[in-house]
Amino acid sequence: MSKSSSFFGQDTLSPNEAGHSLGSVGTFALWFGANVVVTTILTGMLLVPDLRFTTAITVVLIGSLIGAIPLLLVGLMGQRTRLPSMVLTRRAYGPAGSKLISLVNTGVLIAWSCIQALLAGMSLDYAVDATIGYSNLPLFVILSEVAVLLIVLRGHLGIERVERWAAMAMAILTVVVLYQLNQHYAVFKLFAMPIETRSGITLGVAFDIVIATAFSWISLAADYNRNCKSDKIAIWGTYLGYLIATLVAMGLGAMISGLSIMYGLEQNMTRHACLQTLVLVCLPPW
């Protein structure tokens, strides 16, 4: 086998007969790494100050516990059949209906990939600009998308390998951010922070947002979990990985939003909004 052919993944629409490669750690890391992202942090930022900090965390916990159930059930279908999600839709909608659903899903994933590449490029551009003073957003967006394509071309083996390290890195960075927040700011004041209507987020709307976040992963659950080694790994690896990641990311977003308001930082969604807030709240107030 040539080097080029050995690099590309062998994932197909047929049942995976090569054996299951995802253990409990790999499954947990896959779902944890997939959800500790800027977009989930931004979602958490929407909840405070419209809700109390403790209420926001409670909503995230209950909503994730409930919302992840359909997610892990679809993932379990993938593990047992070894089929990706879009192939499984043929049983419900037939070949023609499945093609339409697959086309729509492809368009959504392309758009989502572009958004994630933009956010990754913004992060990289902000970090490089703050370090050496060089800024080139289009270049960093392209580099981010190229890196993703190279990983995806390797198939599920490439994703599994990279996601383990990515999950570990994000967990470490989360601990560092939380440590810095506690070092420089009175985080405990968040528990007494008064409610202030800014985004029109009610308790019901917040619950819907958390549930919708879980549901947004359903179309990919079988694709991820078709490689899990057992039913239990597919269930608990997905459930715990998703639940902990959502609590960490949305909780961090809610914390950042509350602290930025208390210390007079700008609340907006423009170019570096989330990234600037993350960096600023980790520095001592001037």
Image: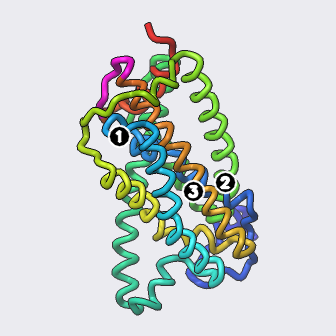
Q: Which residue is mark 2?
A: 29
Q: Is residue 227 magenta?
A: no
Residue 263 in the image, given as x and y percentages of width and height = 38, 17
Q: Which residue is mark 1?
A: 51
Label 1: element kind: loop
Position of 67 relative to 147 (above/below): below
Amino acid type, residue under disc 1 in the picture: Leu
Q: Of callouts 2 and 3, which one flags the residue occurring earlier in the amino acid sequence?
A: 2
Nearer mark to the viewer, of 1 and 3: 1
> Do the residues bearing badges 2 and 3 touch, measured as CB atoms within 8 Å?
no
Residue 137 in the image, given as x and y percentages of width and height = 39, 33
Residue span colored magenta: 262-268
Residue positioned 36% across, 42% down in the render? 47
Amino acid type, residue under disc 3 in the picture: Tyr
Q: Which residue is mark 3?
A: 242
Most common SS among magenta residues? loop
Position of 191 relative to 149 (above/below): above
Q: Residues within 10 Å of mark 1 (few under 14, many from 20)?
A: many
